[in-house]
Amino acid sequence: MTEFSYQLYSSRNFPPLSETLGMLGRLGYKQVEGYGALFADRDALDDLKAGLAASGLSMPTGHFGLDMIRDEPQRVLDIAGALGIQGVFAPFIAPDQRPADAAGWRALGEELSAAAAPFRDAGLTFGWHNHDFEFAATGTGEMPLDLILAGDPDLALELDVAWVVRGGQDPLAWIDKYAGRIAAVHVKDIAPQGECTDEDGWADVGHGVMDWPAIMAALRETGARWFVMEHDNPSDHERFARRSIETARTL
């Protein structure tokens, strides 16, 4: 049986964290995924660790900014060790830092390859998490995601399936293409056109337009270990968490 995780970024607008963790535990989640702001300092880390234990949750994966991954690898390793994180994912690159051409995206993949060494040496999974901008073809017609992954054949992928769709792509084609490299998945949904505008057009899993039964069937044929619920801007995080895990249990 698949254990579903929850990206805590989904609940960033609904403090305190301790209540969010308790809510997730009561709903039946066993795992959560962390993100940069939760790892700000020692006190935050201690509070997070205590909250996870009190709620019966583990944190097998985490998002860390590329700057921290590159410039402070030991800090990332210390956080991972303290929380039991097994998968470290670089989640984003700001618009003003994104490459302008195919060579730049290829170089980013090579940069990630170089940054991966201390994490792989520690036995951790290291990878990239996509948005939609990796599906805007370069002047050569190549896709940035292909170029990033070409920079390191061992770079894992945390595939955000809904962002693939937002990027105008067929998610099943990309799942098939990188089946052996998908280590984690973001399980999220897209609202019908014109709906949920106050939630940036996202939907609770199973309440949007994504064909999650077919997508999950394809993902189960990949190397994916972690399945992480996410909603970028829910108006009610308890509703999102509850309805999404209810759907996930049927997949």
Image (tube, rainbow, N blue to C red):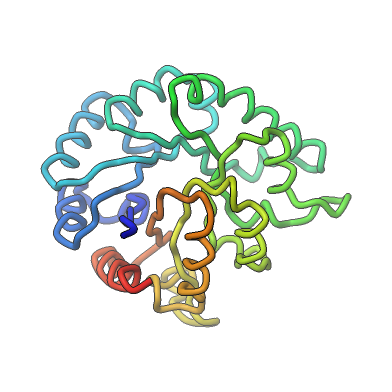
User: Image quarter for residue 230?
Assistant: bottom left
The residue positioned 47% from the left and 72% from the top of the image is: 212
Where is residue 77? Give x, y as percent.
39, 22
Residue lying farthest to the left in this orientation: 54
Q: Is residue 235 left or right of residue 151?
A: left
Q: Is residue 175 left or right of residue 219?
A: right
Q: Is residue 157 above or below residue 1?
A: above
User: Image quarter for residue 108?
Assistant: top right
Where is residue 44? Give x, y as percent.
24, 32
- Given residues 36 and 221, the one toward you in this image is 221
Where is residue 11? Give x, y as percent.
30, 55
Q: Quadrant of the N terminus?
A: bottom left
Q: Quadrant of the C terminus?
A: bottom left
Q: Is residue 181 above or below residue 43?
A: below
The residue positioned 32% from the left and 51% from the top of the image is: 12
The residue positioned 20% from the left and 29% from the top of the image is: 46
Q: Is residue 231 above or below residue 68?
A: below
Q: Is residue 207 above or below residue 241?
A: below
Where is residue 183? Give x, y as percent.
50, 46
Q: Is residue 1 left or right of residue 147?
A: left
The residue positioned 76% from the left and 52% from the top of the image is: 143
